[in-house]
Image (cartoon, rainbow, N blue to C red):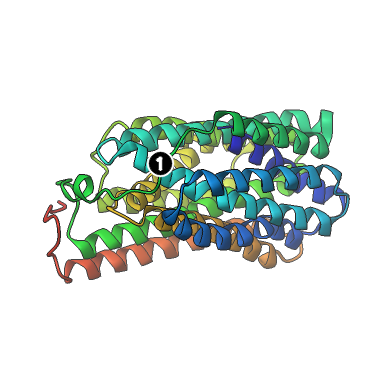
Amino acid sequence: MCSDLALYLIMLSLPYRVLGLGASSLVLGMVPFAYALPYSLTAVTAGRHSDRWPRRGPIRLGLTIAIVAAIALSVADTIPTILAATGLLGIGLGFFWPSIQAGMSELAAGAQLGRDTRLLNVGWSAGKGLGMMAGGLLLPIIGGDGLALGAAAAWLLCFAVLPGMARPASHHAAIDADPRRPWPSRERAFLRAAWIGNGVAYAVAATLNHHFPKILREDGIESGRFGLFLGLVFLTQTLVFLVLGSVRWWHYRMASLLGVQLVLAIAIVAAPAAPGFTGLLMLAPLFGLCLGFLYQSSLYYSLHAPEGRGAQAGVHEATLGLTGAMVPLLGGLAVAGHRLTAPFVVAGIAVSLSFLLAVTWFLRSRTQDRTGPSLTREP
């Protein structure tokens, strides 16, 4: 919770800071990319290596780098320095998150994975929602530099509450005995579909975060109301985590994983045409529902494995980071003249492509080998 509270105090402020320096739509699209590219590369590498040594090391390293980046952002006063400090922040959190997630899965010991992923997701999602709301309200008062210093303080607090974690362990018995696991090719299809679905969900969130301020500013909607909208999105996502972590009906169910992507594609294309701020607020819970379901699916399928959980958590984080940055960047490139809605159309296309990829993987899995540790059939 502290870590994502810190991150989204910063992320809420970045579009306004670069807009104040004369940023174009292309630069707005570059901001999430500057964070996500180093984040994704670091997460893949650090996640894979985190399976080989105690996880507190990369967690502490990541927090230290994040604090340094936040302090750098507090004094950055040009677009290049802001982008550079944002990239450093991506490196820090790329060390942090895969080790936190894999370490949690080992403390959960297999049987409690659903419960403990729920608690983990509620923590970071609540922090994200509160960071968006607080950032929107405080930005006019203390500015982006003040929010960056607040973020540094929150990451410093993480050192005080970091739990003890054992060395990476094998969970073959606990996972292999789970009767809900489908045959191996089907399991891989769910994992890949959840990864890419979560990635484009983050692309939708990043599009809202980084491209909506320009549209809303032209309509006279200030940062406080924008923060309220994003805060409602992510607090709804938190409620979704609370519900999904306590039930199992959605585990390895194809229809639910595909259905939410269709809803998300419609919502992101419709958002710029929402009738006023009240209409936009009505869409917020819909975004939160889709984002929460796709993230929970990706993390659960990444960690519901007998071994290699750090590596799969790294891919989970890297996919959401890189996809979540590429789509807003392409959206910024697509803006021509005053067609500020182009990034939202690009995001809708990305979600639709994710849907088609998932359908392809599921269809292929029906014809592939069904032998493995479990022969649970999906209705």
**Res. 52 image quadrant:** bottom left
Identified at 44% across, 39% down, the residue is 165
Quadrant housing the N terminus: top right
Residue 197, relative to residue 3: is it above or below?
A: below
**46, 14: nearer the viewer:** 46
- Characterize the local packing of mark 1: few (<14), some (14-19) or many (20 or more) Cα atoms within 10 angstroms: few
Identified at 55% across, 55% down, the residue is 203
User: Element under label 1?
Assistant: loop
In percent of width and height, residue 191 lies at 33, 58
**193, 149: nearer the viewer:** 149
User: Tag count in the figure?
Assistant: 1
Q: Left or right: where does residue 143 sit relative to residue 331?
A: right
In percent of width and height, residue 359 lies at 31, 64
In percent of width and height, residue 284 lies at 53, 37
- Residue 228 showing in the rendered view: no
**235, 119: nearer the viewer:** 119
Q: Left or right: where does residue 249 sit relative to residue 47?
A: left
Identified at 77% across, 35% down, the residue is 149
Residue picked out by circle 1: 166
- Residue 236 showing in the rendered view: yes
Q: Disc 1 marks which amino acid?
A: Ala
In percent of width and height, residue 237 lies at 47, 36
Identified at 44% across, 61% down, the residue is 352
Q: Left or right: where does residue 294 sit relative to residue 361?
A: right
